[in-house]
Image (cartoon, rainbow, N blue to C red):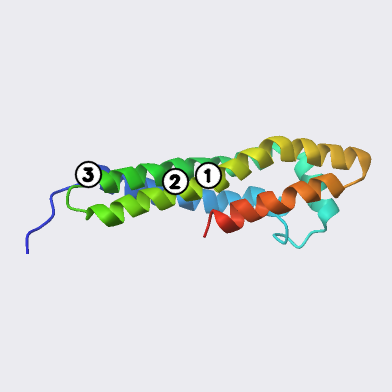
């Protein structure tokens, strides 16, 4: 059996992927959990109020997840470029990564922009209806479809 050629770019991408995903999980627990549906057990009002009061913490909490998507894409491309990785699995990895990034990043970008505005408006008016209607499909896209 021949030994595969060294792949420093692949090794670097794997290490970066691991490090960024650890940071993203830590940011989820430290910054995002109080604003997530079912995350902290807080009422909808408490979650939305927290988000409206700390929009930059919410945005900062999503930053490692944005970086994770970029790193995941870089890893998929690096796998495709490694000559000793079979083509079909590498192509499928790239395609699945691209398919996951669309709902994931799209929903996160919507949440840190329009979602923050809706949360601030909900707290100001005392009516959570518009925010909660917005949050449901965005949360499903980010937490469900993208992770699937």
Q: In this view, does 85 lie to the left or right of 54?
A: left
Q: Nearer the viewer, residue 110 or 124?
A: 110
Q: Position of residue 58 (x, y in %)?
A: 67, 42
Q: Which of 34 and 139 is in front in this view?
A: 139
Q: Position of residue 40 (x, y in %)?
A: 72, 60
**Crowdedness near tag 3: few (<14), some (14–19) or many (≥20) residues, C-alpha within 10 Å:** few
**Crowdedness near tag 2: few (<14), some (14–19) or many (≥20) residues, C-alpha within 10 Å:** some
Separation of disc 2 and disc 3 at Cα?
Answer: 23 Å
Q: Do the residues labelled 2 and 1 touch (CB within 8 Å)?
A: yes
Residue at numbered disc 3: 8
Q: Position of residue 80 (x, y in %)?
A: 27, 46
**Helix, strand or loop under label 2:** helix
**Helix, strand or loop under label 1:** helix
Front of the two marks 3 and 1: 1
Residue at numbered disc 2: 98
Residue at image location 41% in from the left, 47% down from the top: 72
Residue 102: which disc?
Answer: 1
Residue at image location 40% in from the left, 43% down from the top: 73
Separation of disc 2 and disc 1 at Cα?
Answer: 7 Å
């Amino acid at each position: 059996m021949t030994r595969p050629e060294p792949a420093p770019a692949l090794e670097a991408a794997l290490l970066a992927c691991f490090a960024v995903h650890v940071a993203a999980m830590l940011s989820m627990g430290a910054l995002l959990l109080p604003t997530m549906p079912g995350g902290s057990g807080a009422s909808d009002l408490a979650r939305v109020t927290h988000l409206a009061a700390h929009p930059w913490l919410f945005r900062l909490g999503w930053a490692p997840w944005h970086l994770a998507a970029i790193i995941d894409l870089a890893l998929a491309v690096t796998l495709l470029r490694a000559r000793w990785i079979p083509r079909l699995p590498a192509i499928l990895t790239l395609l699945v990564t691209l398919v996951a990034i669309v709902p994931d990043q799209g929903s996160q970008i919507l949440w840190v922009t329009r979602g923050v505005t809706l949360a601030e408006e909900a707290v100001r008016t005392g009516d959570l209806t518009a925010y909660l209607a917005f949050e449901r499909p965005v949360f499903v896209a980010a937490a469900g479809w993208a992770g699937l």
